[in-house]
Image (cartoon, grey):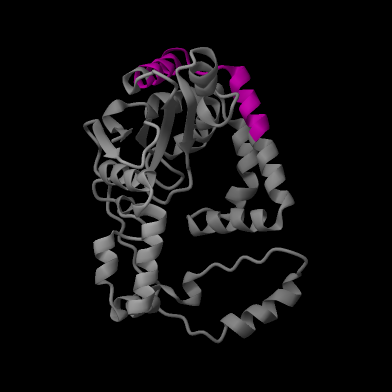
Amino acid sequence: VVAERKVVLEERSSRVDSTPTGLFFEQMNAAQYLTYPYRIPVIGWESEIRSLSLEDALEWYRTYYTPNNAILIVAGNVTLDVLRPLAKKYYGVIPQRAQPVRNRPHEPPQLAARRLEMFHSQVTQDTWRRSYLAPSYQWGERRHALPLQLLAQVLGGRSTSRLYRDMVIDSQVAVQASAFYSATDVGPSQFFLFAVPRGDTTLDGIEAQMDSVIADVLENGITQEELDRTKDFLMAQVIYARDNVQGAARMFGEALTNGQTIEDVESWPDRMKAVTLDEVNAAARHIFDKSRSVTGILRTR
């Protein structure tokens, strides 16, 4: 146990503690979520890891490692007639146990904008980021989840996005500008904005320009051309993902473990294509509320 605990500590050290962005993301998540478990790092805080015992590991195993709490994904040149006997042979002999109870707390409404500023000696370039508490397929105003996926691509998913064109190409205040959103979280998700200033541009200047882009989206919305182009791009991504056996397996596995169904995965392209411009603009008005945001600044020391 001591040896394995040291391995976990070393992994945390290499992936999080030795990287300023890793440490800062932890701080932003802890600020965003008041009660929901997403405020806790997946690997755990260092103090928590150091306190883990043999009994903690065994209790976790006894609670969660049971075949009726597992999803088996098999992809490739195999038929059900061949697969079913193998599944029975290797998994059928393992006894079932009670389904674990997952007590997920309610995340209280965020009523005030939060700001963090962190200095670190290893930071070579100041960065600006903001996260908004967001609905997902399983939490909150679920009708906005799919439109938000499209909005994230329109705003900052690639080099033709609105943020990149405005901040990197046109005004040239940033060397990088992007947006990201995940709809598949079991609980409350986050909608991220990110930018890195160019040259003498200040972080205040970056924030003002980002706010200007968002204000324009709120006032005028995105365009039908932007939406159509984004739908074409996402359709291509879905098709390419199915070309890869591992990609297809991952797609279904993630969906099933996050409370979705096979039908949800199969119907996603049609549902995505059916999203209207009004729905995307309504999702933008829902999400861009500064009182539900965390703004973070990571600076050189």
Query: Is 279 drawn above or below residue 95 in the view shown?
Result: above
Q: Which of 189 and 27 is in front in this view?
A: 27
Question: Which residues are drawn in magenta?
Answer: 206-233
Mainly helix, strand or loop, the magenta region?
helix
Image quadrant where one finds the C terminus: top left
Quadrant in which residue 282 is drawn:
top left
| Residue 196 included in the magenta stretch of the image | no
In the picture, measured across the screen, residue 165 lies left or right of residue 116, that is: right
Q: In which quarter of the image is residue 199?
A: top left
Q: Is residue 185 left or right of residue 294?
A: right
Q: Position of residue 158 (x, y in %)?
A: 58, 30
Q: In the image, is residue 225 part of the stretch drawn in magenta?
A: yes
Question: Which of the 4 quarters of the picture holds residue 27?
Answer: top left
In the rendered image, the residue lying farthest to the bottom is 93
What residue sits 48% from the left and 43% below the top? 183
Image quadrant holding the N terminus, namely bottom left
Can you give x and y, in whole percent of width and height, for residue 244 in the image? Answer: 71, 53
Does residue 159 appear in this view?
Answer: yes
- Residue at point 49% right, 74% down? 68
Picture residue at 45% right of the left edge, 34% below the top: 144
Decide if residue 18 is on the left or right side of residue 235: left
Looking at the image, which residue is at 42% across and 13% down? 219
